[in-house]
């Protein structure tokens, strides 16, 4: 009996203690490349997502999210996370404790395409997170921007306002790079660029003048303005 079948059986038996034992072992196994591949071949990802409400009622949700993350973060296992499985994971908001799950599940156009109905929900969650502190949120936005940029206008405007009122010297360079990825990609794909530019241009130019010595920031602002005014 494989792990997926064991989980199905133990859930039917309503044995929470045994279920936790299986999940604890799974968390160890998914950190091994070969074992994680076998588990995916046995459809463990589908089993975990399919029973997420069962895990929630038993307070095992965070453990399951950790297991899913260890699988989904491996590009070599990406094909096991079909658009349908990706949709189920994102629909259940399993990424909100770890946005690298969202980033990993939006790598391909097909994955992005299948979650079109979930974008408003994703944006609501993103509004609750600091773009200046979470690189995975920024890279998720960059992934989604190619198809859904116009739905992210409020995220972009709020992000620019936050950036303009922040002490840039306190922001890590890696966070600034990630923010740049999100903002430049959005700027590239907005439909009504002129309208958006009119709301942010002056603020960004002022910020650029204030931090002339910050090459990373200045390059990001230059790219944003360039894309918005093309």
Image (tube, rainbow, N blue to C red):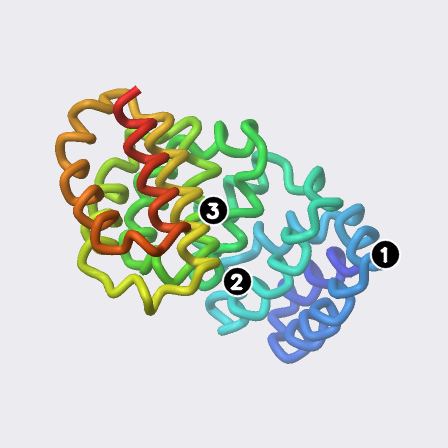
- Please state which of residues 84 and 187 is positioned toward the viewer in this rendering: 187
Relative to 90, residue 56 above or below: below
- Where residue 26 sits, quadrant-wise, is bottom right
What secondary structure is marked by label 2? helix
Whether tag 2 and tag 1 are in contact, CB under 8 A, the answer is no
- Where residue 176 sits, quadrant-wise, is bottom left
Would you name the residue on which mark 1 appears? 34
Relative to 7, residue 158 above or below: above
Tell me: 70 left or right of 151: right
Q: Please name the residue shown 24% across and 24% down the image.
A: 193
What secondary structure is marked by label 1? helix
Q: Kindly report the distance in space between the C-alpha atoms of the residues bearing marks 3 and 1.
A: 28 Å
| The label number, if any, that marks residue 143 in the structure image | none
Q: Which dot, 2 or 3, sits closer to the camera?
A: 3
Q: Position of residue 20 (x, y in %)?
A: 64, 75
Would you name the residue on which mark 3 appears? 139
Q: Position of residue 161 (x, y in %)?
A: 18, 50
- Where residue 202 sits, quadrant-wise, is top left
Q: Please name the residue shown 64% across and 53% down the image.
A: 73
Q: Position of residue 50 (x, y in %)?
A: 57, 50
Would you name the residue on which mark 2 appears? 54
Badge 2 or badge 1: first in the primary sequence: 1
Q: Which dot, 2 or 1, sits closer to the camera?
A: 1
- Please state which of residues 156 and 69 is positioned toward the viewer in this rendering: 156
């Amino acid at each position: 009996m494989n792990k997926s079948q064991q989980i199905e059986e133990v859930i039917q038996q309503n044995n929470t203690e045994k279920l936790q034992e299986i999940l604890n072992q799974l968390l160890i196994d998914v950190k091994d490349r070969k074992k994680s591949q076998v588990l995916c071949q046995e459809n463990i990802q589908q089993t975990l997502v399919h029973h997420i409400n069962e895990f929630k009622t038993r307070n095992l949700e965070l453990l399951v999210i950790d297991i899913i993350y260890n699988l989904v973060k491996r590009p070599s296992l990406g094909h096991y996370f079909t658009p349908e499985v990706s949709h189920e994971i994102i629909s259940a908001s399993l990424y909100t404790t770890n946005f690298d799950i969202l980033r990993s599940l939006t790598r391909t156009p097909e994955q992005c395409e299948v979650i079109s109905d979930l974008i408003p929900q994703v944006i609501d969650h993103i509004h609750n997170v600091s773009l200046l502190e979470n690189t995975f949120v920024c890279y998720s936005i960059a992934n989604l921007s190619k198809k859904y940029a116009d739905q992210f206008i409020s995220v972009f405007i709020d992000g620019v306002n936050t950036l303009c009122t922040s002490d840039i010297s306190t922001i890590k360079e890696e966070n600034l790079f990630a923010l740049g990825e999100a903002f430049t990609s959005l700027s590239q794909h907005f439909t009504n660029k002129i309208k958006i530019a009119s709301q942010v241009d002056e603020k960004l130019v002022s910020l650029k003048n204030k931090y002339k010595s910050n090459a990373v920031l200045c390059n990001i602002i230059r790219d944003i303005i360039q894309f918005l005014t093309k």
